[in-house]
Every structure is written in structure tokens, then in C-alpha cells.
Amino acid sequence: MQEFDDEDDGPISLGAADGPEDADLGPDEHDMDLMDGSWEEKYYSGRVRAFNWRGITAALGVIVLIALLVPALLTVFGR
């Protein structure tokens, strides 16, 4: 039969080694644009580029269409 040590019955830490008193969960320099609202100014001014998903989808559709038609045309008219 195996005997267990009863002296180590404390809670098991699953997080960082530092305690919650050392953790700084407040805003840092990466959050300053959220706090002062400058992200809104950049976003709504039009200087932030967004993807044109409709154009990307159309271009991919054309590429797929060409990839389907070229082998068919080469099969019919090719030697």
C-alpha cells in the first residue's frame, strides 16, 4: 500500500507564477487608441483600407471560369 504526503494539500496554480496582486490588467499603450477615440477618426476618415470582397470574389470566379474553359477548348480545338 502506498502512503501519501499530507503536507502538500494547497491549491494547484493553473495560471502564471505571479499572484493576482502583481498582475496589471489595466489598459496599456496598445489600448490608448481605443480609449481616446482616435481609431474612429482613422477608420471613418477613409485612410484605413478595407478589402473589396465583391471584387475579390469576382476575380476568383473569373479565374475558375478560365480554368474550366481552357482545357475544354483545348480538348475540342486542340490536336
Image (tube, rainbow, N blue to C red):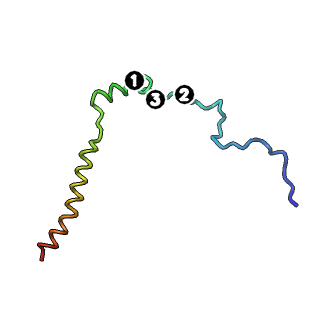
Which of the two discs, 1 and 3, labels the residue nearer the N terminus?
A: 3
* Amino acid type, mark 1: Gly
Q: Which residue position holds label 3? A: 31
Residue placed at 65% from the left, 36% from the top? 18
Residue 27 falls left or right of residue 5: left
The quarter of the picture where residue 66 lies is bottom left
Q: Which residue is tagged 2?
A: 26
SS for callout 3: helix
Marks 1 & 3, CB-CB < 8 Å contact: no
Residue type at tag 2: Gly
**Residue 26 shown left or right of residue 9 in the figure:** left
Residue at the (66%, 34%) spot, across then down: 19
Instruction: Using residue 12 as the reference point, say whether residue 23 is left or right of it.
Output: left
Calculate the distance from the C-alpha at mark 1 to the C-alpha at mark 3: 10 Å
Q: Distance between the Cα atoms at labels 3 and 2?
A: 9 Å
SS class of the residue under badge 2?
A: loop
Q: What residue do we see at 45% from left, 31% from top?
A: 30
Q: Residue at x 28, y 36 (%)?
A: 49
Q: Position of residue 29 (x, y in %)?
A: 46, 29
Q: Looking at this view, name the residue that lies furthest to the top.
A: 36
> What kind of residue is marked 3?
Asp
Between discs 3 and 2, the one toward the N terminus: 2
Q: Front-most of 9 and 50?
A: 50
Q: Is residue 24 left or right of residue 8?
A: left
> Nearer the viewer's eye, disc 1 or disc 3?
1
The quadrant where residue 77 appears: bottom left
Q: CA distance from mark 1 to mark 2?
A: 17 Å
Q: What residue would you read off at disc 1? A: 37
Label 1: which secondary element: loop
The quadrant of the image that shows the C terminus is bottom left
**Closer to viewer: mark 1 or mark 2:** 1
The image shows residue 29, relative to residue 12, as above or below, that is above
